[in-house]
Image: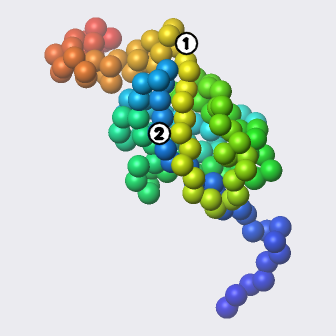
Amino acid sequence: MSVPVSADEVSEFPLILRGNVSINGDPAPAGTEIVVKLDGIIVGQVTTNQEGVYGDTPTSRLLLTPPSERYGDLVFSIDGIKINIENMAVITNASPGDSIIFDIDATIPEDDITSINTANPYLTASIFGIVLVLFLKRKQD
């Protein structure tokens, strides 16, 4: 049995993004969180699975759910730091349901990069080995 609905009751399909992500010209590390907000409300978010790429698998695409007429008002952030998007026209010219390749080239001040790298001491310390991770854990206790 089908139920008729008006066009106003049908929500738009999400805009689907995937592509490369870099911070100051270097590939963003795996685990980088990309968040997109509209009027302070999260309308899409994803965490990278591999260095320099987001949306590399169908389940890791960045799905944006705002109304299409508001695509130009989206605010992007990487690991909690607001970034400017130079190629926003790619998004504003898209239609709901489109799947597009959208590279994010973030320029973040060095002080903020330091805060990204030290915000999670377990992630940062894992580069240096498990001994340092245990040291940091013990120091915090």
Please state, as top left, top right, bottom left or bottom right, where the N terminus lies in the image. Answer: bottom right
Residue found at x 16% / y 16%: 131
Question: In front: 50, or 38?
Answer: 50
**Secondary-structure class at tag 1:** loop
What's under tag 2, amino acid-wise? Asn
* Earlier-in-chain disc, 1 versus 2: 2
Indicate which disc residue 109 carries: 1
At 68% from the left edge and 46% from the top edge, which residue is drawn? 91
> Splitting the image into 4 quarters, where does residue 124 fall?
top left
At numbered mark 2, what does the secondary structure look like: helix, strand or loop? strand
Residue 79's label in the rendered image is none
Q: Label 2 belongs to which residue?
A: 20
Residue 118 drawn above or below residue 72 = above
Mark nearer the viewer, 1 or 2: 2
Left or right relative to 39: residue 77: left
Q: Amino acid at mark 1?
A: Pro
Q: Is residue 135 left or right of residue 80?
A: left
Q: Is residue 86 above or below residue 136?
A: below
**89 left or right of 62 in image:** right
Q: Is residue 41 at all visible to an observer of this figure?
A: no
Q: Is residue 33 above or below residue 123?
A: below
Which class describes the residues within 10 Å of circle 2: few (<14), some (14-19), or many (20+)? some
